[in-house]
Amino acid sequence: MFDFTGRCAIALPKAVGAPTSVDWRSIPRLLQEIGADAWPVTSIANLLVGVIVGFLGVSQLGRFGAVAFVPELVVVAHFRELCPLITAIVVGGRSGAGLASEIATMKVSEEIDALRSMGLDPVRWLVVPRCLALVLTLPLLTWIGDVFGVAGGMTATMAITNMTARAYVQATFNHITVAHLLVGLVKTPFLALAIGLIACGNGLATQGGAAAVGSRTTSAVVQSIFGVVVISTIFTFFFALLGI
């Protein structure tokens, strides 16, 4: 893992110095597959999580007559923690599996060896554009998920309380701060990079036939989800120490 991460770190400045060593033409396709094709499922997941947080907030805070604080609970919980985590987990399970299986199939079919025979570094040619596409799309998917999470919380709150949509939206905007928004968005590039490195690393490490492709794809998904949770926990602890 550390060896592959080091090779990727070395490949990045080399890619900047030699742009032709990177498959830039694949980036539009990757942005389509990772971002545009994934936003419906990530948005629905965040919408449902917003509904869950809204129901829990009403059921718990309602006992103390504090239903007015439900919008703040949804904003803080969803913007800071839940939305980046849920979005990254969905992307890791969906796009991470796709990237790992694609590269693993190339490795089994000896396409990786063909790239090396043409003088191309597989890390620069394959890994750099995929990681770049993830870093560009995950923050955008997270931002869209924030909107759907607020909508889910509003739907749940209005369904079981007398709070109006106007009152909920006004309370939501009163509690949306730059700190809450940035705390959630700052971690997303690191989560995306972890998904890309784990997926591509498992793909390039494939050895064997079709069974090895399936095994590496499964490992990529499990490791991506675990890595996302660990990185999110580290950021949460770091921001708590800073008092943000």
Image (cartoon, rainbow, N blue to C red):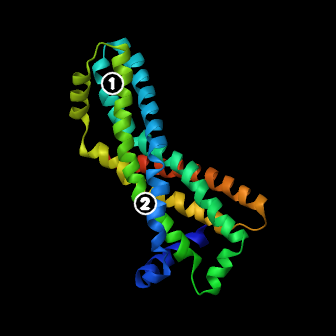
Residue at (29% x, 24% y) in the render: 69
Label of residue 60 in the image: none
Q: Residue type at mark 1: give it.
A: Val
Q: Which residue is mark 2?
A: 135
Residue at (46% x, 36% y) in the render: 44
Q: Secondary structure at mark 1?
A: helix
Position in image of residue 117 (x %, y %): 65, 86
Q: Which residue is mark 1?
A: 70
To which quarter of the image does residue 70 belong?
top left
Position in image of residue 11 (x %, y %): 50, 78
Residue 34 appearing in the image: yes
Position in image of residue 201 (x %, y %): 61, 66
First of labels 2, 1 by sequence position: 1
* Left or right of residue 196, residue 64 in this image: left
Q: Is residue 46 above or below residue 91?
A: above
Q: Residue type at mark 2: give it.
A: Val
Q: Is residue 70 above or below residue 160?
A: below
Position in image of residue 154 (x %, y %): 33, 25
Residue at (59% x, 71% y) in the render: 4
